[in-house]
Structure formats: structure tokens, C-alpha cells
Amino acid sequence: MWNERYSSKEYAYGTEPNTFLTANFQHLPKGRVLSLAEGEGRNAVFLAQQGYAVTAVDGSQVGLDKAQVLAEARGVKLECICADLADFELGVSAWDAIVSIFCPLPPAIRQALYRKVFAALKPGGVFLLEAYTPEQIIHGTGGGKSVELMQTAASLRAELPGLDFVHLLELEREVVEGTFHTGLGAVVQAIGIKHAAEAP
């Protein structure tokens, strides 16, 4: 599906970064950042432009090839890894920040990934996320039609118990990101800090 979606010359979700990320990237400690389900590179390229060492992981090589084209056009470098997030090993205390922007995953895969996310963050590391909530189904402006792939503030607290959320909010906002995310959206936004060296 994703290779097909990213196969056109146009960027499916545009080339401009997510606005929640642009408004809050200063919360991310300088250093190594991992961007999950990065797709065609818009968010990773933005972070690289801010001076971060960015690794983009996605299951679509087609998307990542476009990410490299975008990075070259904007004069920055990315490390790109094509991998299934169900199997991808994030490492231990390896990242200063991890970013997840509209990364829909089945609950079992998501929960396993979040355990890896917590372990992979360095102490003081930050996890920044924006995702659609189940109310998004009403709007139909992106994110598909499967409620189980969506998230809430409560699910994030439950699945990332080791993080101290300095920002966790459900809201409706205009999302204008290319062809597939355009219009009023129901989202959850999160910024969580790992204070402990090990998972509880």
C-alpha cells in the first residue's frame, strides 16, 4: 500500500513539516532523533534543518527514496532505514528524541513498539507524537477508517507509563498535509520525557 501511495511524483503528504512538530521541536534535546514511519521525509528533513542528526525509518523504500531527494534539495543529510516497525530494533538509550507523526499501527504492534521506544530513549530523552483519535472517523479527512489504529490521551498514558507527559491534549484542528491529510481533524498531541534510566 505505502509503496503505491508514494509512487507518484507528488508528495502524498506534502513537503512541509507537521505544524505540531514545528511549534514544539525546541522540546527535543539536540542530538540524535529517530523519526518513526517517516514516509517521504518532510518531518525528518525539517529536523535536520534545525541541526539534529536524524534517522528516518519507514516500511516503504519508495517513500524513503523521496525523502533523500527532499533532503538533498534542502541541503541536509538523513540516515534512512527501510524496516517494518513490528520488527525494528531501536536500541537501548540510543536516542535523544523519538518522533511519531501520524503512525497508525495495530494495538499489539504499537504497544510492543512503545516498550522499545521507552528503552531506546536516553534519560532526559523526549518522545513527541501527533496521532488521530477515534473521533477522526466522523471527519473522514485522513487516517483511514480503523479505530483500533487510532490513539487517545488515555491510551498513550497506559502504553507509555514511564514517560512524564509535559503536554498531552486531545483537540480538533485543521490538518493540511498534502492530499491525504486535509481538513478538520481530531488529534491527540503528546510530548513525554523519560526521567528514569530503566523502564518500570
Image (cartoon, rainbow, N blue to C red):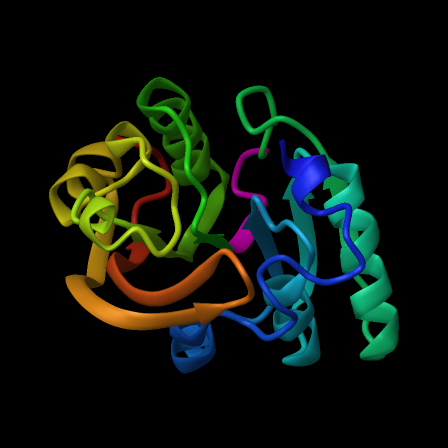
Image side of residue 45 versus residue 113, left or right: right
Asked if residue 80 shows in the view, the reply is no
Residue at horizontal 38 percent and vertical 40 percent from the top:
144
Which of the 4 image quarters holds residue 172?
Answer: bottom left
Question: What is the quadrant of residue 193 in the picture?
Answer: bottom left
Is 71 left, or right, of 14 in this rendering? right
Give x and y (percent) for residue 105: 41, 31
- Residue 98 x, y percent position in the rendering: 49, 52
The residue lying toward the viewer, choosing from 47 and 115, is 47
Residue 93 colored magenta? yes
Q: Check the picture and name the quadrant holding the N terminus.
A: top right
Q: Nearer the viewer, residue 50 or 132?
A: 132
Residue closer to the observer: 156 or 73: 73
Residue 189 spot, x, y in % from top left: 27, 60
In the displayed structure, does residue 77 sit left or right of residue 174? right
Magenta region: 91-97
Measured from the top left, where is residue 93 in percent x and y?
Answer: 52, 42
Question: Is 35 placed above or below 50 here?
Answer: above
Quarter in which the C terminus is drawn: top left
- Name the residue furthest left: 154
| Residue drawn at point x = 37 percent, y = 24 percent | 106
Magenta highlight on residue 67:
no
Looking at the image, is 41 positioned above or below residue 173? above
Residue sitting at 81 percent across and 73 percent down?
Answer: 76
Residue 102 visible from this viewpoint: yes
